[in-house]
């Protein structure tokens, strides 16, 4: 069985060395590397979630609801701005662009022109409800079918605090029930291990976020 305490200490040491090494690298290369800030501009498009990709280093980012983005670059990097609703836009980070605090990128909507479509009758009655009932479609519609974002996967397990269990125990004559599963998870150390696991996941996510922002090539070269 894995020793959680030893594993946690090892991860903390590796994480500390990575942050220290990153700071040293940044201090040595800050005149060549910077956080490139920009704003995607359009009068008619939703500017949230547009992909910003540094083709040279592999770094990735997305725009916020206002079209703003930030991504690590150096001179002569190639930045690609793309989304399903806009025409791809390419920026070569020349010295002039590199030295700007913020650039504005004006994008054009992407229009997918379809070939001629031939519409044929299918014995529809004109009554939408009756036609839907007679269509023979039985599969349920979910959020993917209508383009609505939704949660997939398991929900995050709630950790019942010791204070809540003590209060439930004191109020047992009134409530008539006690969360036996939560009591067992506290006594067995399950909640303690779960908290440590979530801490490790958070630290790992921070490392991944740093690597995605600057790109793997940046760390390999330095």
Image (cartoon, rainbow, N blue to C red):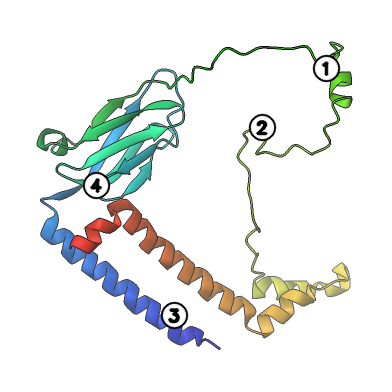
Q: Are marks 3 and 4 in contact (CB under 8 Å)?
A: no
Name which of mark 1 and mark 3 comes first in the sequence: 3
Residue drawn where x is 11% and y is 33% of the image = 96
How far is the residue under mark 4 from the one under mark 2?
A: 36 Å
Front residue of this view, candidates 155 and 117 = 117
**Dot 1 lies on which element?**
helix
Q: Which mark is residue 146?
A: 2
Q: Is residue 127 left or right of residue 161?
A: right
The residue located at (62%, 33%) in the rendering is: 147
> Comparing marks 3 and 4, which lies closer to the viewer?
4
Q: CA distance from mark 2 to mark 3?
A: 43 Å
Q: Position of residue 4 (x, y in %)?
A: 50, 84
Residue with the mark numbered 3: 8
Q: Quadrant of residue 21?
A: bottom left
Image side of residue 163 versus residue 139, left or right:
left
Residue on which disc 4 sits: 56
Please provide percent x and percent y for residue 126.
84, 10
The image shows residue 161, relative to residue 76, as above or below, that is below
Q: Are marks 2 and 3 in contact (CB under 8 Å)?
A: no
Distance CA(mark 2)–CA(mark 1): 18 Å
Of the numbered discs 4 and 2, the one sitting upstream in the chain is 4
Left or right: 139 as drawn, with respect to 203:
right
Local SS, label 2? loop
Labelled disc at residue 128: 1
Instruction: Give the spatial CA distance, label 3 vs label 4.
Output: 35 Å
Numbered circle sitting on residue 85: none
Q: Mark 2 or mark 3: which comes first in sequence?
A: 3
What percent of the width, then of the height, locates residue 197?
52, 73
Q: Residues within 10 Å of mark 3 (few under 14, many from 20)?
A: some
| For residue 177, above or below residue 131 | below
Name the front one of labels 1 and 3.
1
Q: Dot 4, how many residues are within 10 Å of its Cα: few (below 14), some (14-19), or many (20+)?
A: some
């Amino acid at each position: 069985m894995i020793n959680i305490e030893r594993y946690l200490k090892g991860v903390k040491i590796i994480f500390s060395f990575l942050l220290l090494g990153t700071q040293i690298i940044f201090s040595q290369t800050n005149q060549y590397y910077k956080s490139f800030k920009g704003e995607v501009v359009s009068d008619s498009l939703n500017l949230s979630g547009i992909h910003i990709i540094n083709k040279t280093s592999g770094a990735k980012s997305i725009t916020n609801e206002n079209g703003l983005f930030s991504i690590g670059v150096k001179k002569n990097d190639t930045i690609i701005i793309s989304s399903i609703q806009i025409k791809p836009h390419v920026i070569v980070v020349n010295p002039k662009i590199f030295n700007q605090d913020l650039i504005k990128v004006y994008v054009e909507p992407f229009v997918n022109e379809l070939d001629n479509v031939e519409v044929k009758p299918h014995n529809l009655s004109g009554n939408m409800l009756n036609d839907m009932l007679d269509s023979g479609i039985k599969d349920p519609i979910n959020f993917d079918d209508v383009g609505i974002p939704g949660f997939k996967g398991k929900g995050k397990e709630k950790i019942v605090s010791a204070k809540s269990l003590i209060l439930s125990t004191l109020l047992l004559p009134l409530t008539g029930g006690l969360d036996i599963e939560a009591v067992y998870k506290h006594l067995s150390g399950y909640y303690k291990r779960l908290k440590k696991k979530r801490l490790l996941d958070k630290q790992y996510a921070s490392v991944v976020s740093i690597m995605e922002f600057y790109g793997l090539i940046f760390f390999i070269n330095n």
